């Protein structure tokens, strides 16, 4: 596998509040747009990261709080690597599954969007030993 | 997010503008369910929606199901590209009735 130089495009740290998400989306859009992603891909990526942040706010932190979400975006060769970290109690990744879309009902679409948009989605053990670290990878197209 | 509700030819038209996201979707849900509960056909104009997420889509689904239950029409009109893409990702573009224009929707419901 070729070694690519990694370039950090964005590093954000913000309180886990719904009111912070618009500003966050704008920053992500700006970072991703500069990498040659199509408008459609950029929109998809912004949606996926927004949904991942929402999962942290709603499920990990159980609502708006002053707890922190950290986002890092790196450009590695033909890929974008997204890392989302929180300090919430460790979640069980096996419980986070997209729902069956044939079951038309409100809610539960966020995880589906993330899986549809990203090429890789993985929960890692944070280096600090606490919280959660979500790594997502998307090829640039 | 801003919203406006008006009556047109016996139907209710709800227009949203801006981001229908986690911060604003509770309001969107409330408005939509109130409109549906009025018992008239409801058309939701999404032409000025710059962003919609899963919580916004959930509000639409809930209102759609409430209207279906009571036998009134619920349709989306003038859905812009960004919102349509999210509906496509959710495979809801084939579930909702979507009209290109409001007049097309209202014509179809009379």
Image (cartoon, rainbow, N blue to C red):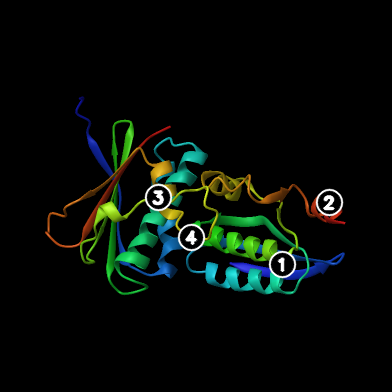
Q: Is residue A75 left or right of residue B108?
A: left
* Left or right: B86 as drawn, with respect to A49: right
Residue name at image x 69 percent, y 64 percent: B67
Q: Circle 3 sits in a helix, a strand or a loop, which is it?
A: loop
Q: Residue A98: which numbered mark, if any? A: 3
Q: Residue at x 81, y 69 (%)?
A: B7
Spatial CA span between label 1 and label 4: 21 Å
Residue of label 4? A107
Q: Are marks 2 and 4 on the same chain?
A: no
Report which residue position mark 1 lands on: B70
Query: Looking at this view, is B15 or A59 the one in front?
Result: A59
Q: Residue B70: percent from the left, percent from the top? A: 71, 67
- Image mark 2: chain: B
Q: Are marks 3 and 4 on the same chain?
A: yes
Q: Is residue A29 visible?
A: no
**Could you tell me which chain the residue with mark 4 belongs to?**
A
Q: What residue does disc 2 label? A: B108
Q: Residue at x 37, y 73 (%)?
A: A64
Label 1: how many Cα within 10 Å (few below 14, some 14–19, many 20+): few
Q: Position of residue A131 (x, y in %)?
A: 20, 62
Q: Position of residue A133 (x, y in %)?
A: 23, 54
Mark 3–mark 2 distance (CA, rounded to whole Å) = 35 Å
Q: Nearer the viewer, residue B10 or B73?
A: B73
Q: Quadrant of the N terminus of chain B?
A: bottom right
Residue A139, image x, y percentages: 36, 34
């Amino acid at each position: 596998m070729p070694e690519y130089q990694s370039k950090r495009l964005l590093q954000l740290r913000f309180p886990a509040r719904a009111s912070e998400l618009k500003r966050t989306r704008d920053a992500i859009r700006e970072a991703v747009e500069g990498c040659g992603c199509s408008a459609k891909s950029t929109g998809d990526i912004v949606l996926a990261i927004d949904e991942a942040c929402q999962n942290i706010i709603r499920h990990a932190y159980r609502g708006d709080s002053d707890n922190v979400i950290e986002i890092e975006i790196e450009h590695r060769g033909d890929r974008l690597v997204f890392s989302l970290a929180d300090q919430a109690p460790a979640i069980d990744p096996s419980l986070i599954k997209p729902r069956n879309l044939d079951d038309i009902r409100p809610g539960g679409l966020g995880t589906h969007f993330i899986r549809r948009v990203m090429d890789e989605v993985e929960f890692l053990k944070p280096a600090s030993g606490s919280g959660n670290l979500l790594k997502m990878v998307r090829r640039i197209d | 997010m801003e919203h406006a509700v008006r009556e047109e030819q016996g139907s209710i038209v709800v227009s949203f503008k801006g981001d229908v996201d986690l911060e604003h979707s509770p309001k969107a849900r409330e408005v939509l369910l109130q409109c549906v509960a009025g018992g008239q056909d409801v058309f939701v104009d999404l032409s000025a929606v710059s962003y919609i997420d899963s919580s916004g889509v959930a509000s639409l689904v809930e209102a759609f199901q409430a209207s279906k239950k009571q036998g009134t029409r619920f349709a989306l009109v003038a859905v812009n590209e960004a919102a349509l893409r999210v509906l496509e990702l959710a495979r809801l573009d084939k579930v909702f009735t979507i009209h290109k224009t409001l007049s097309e929707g209202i014509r179809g419901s009379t």
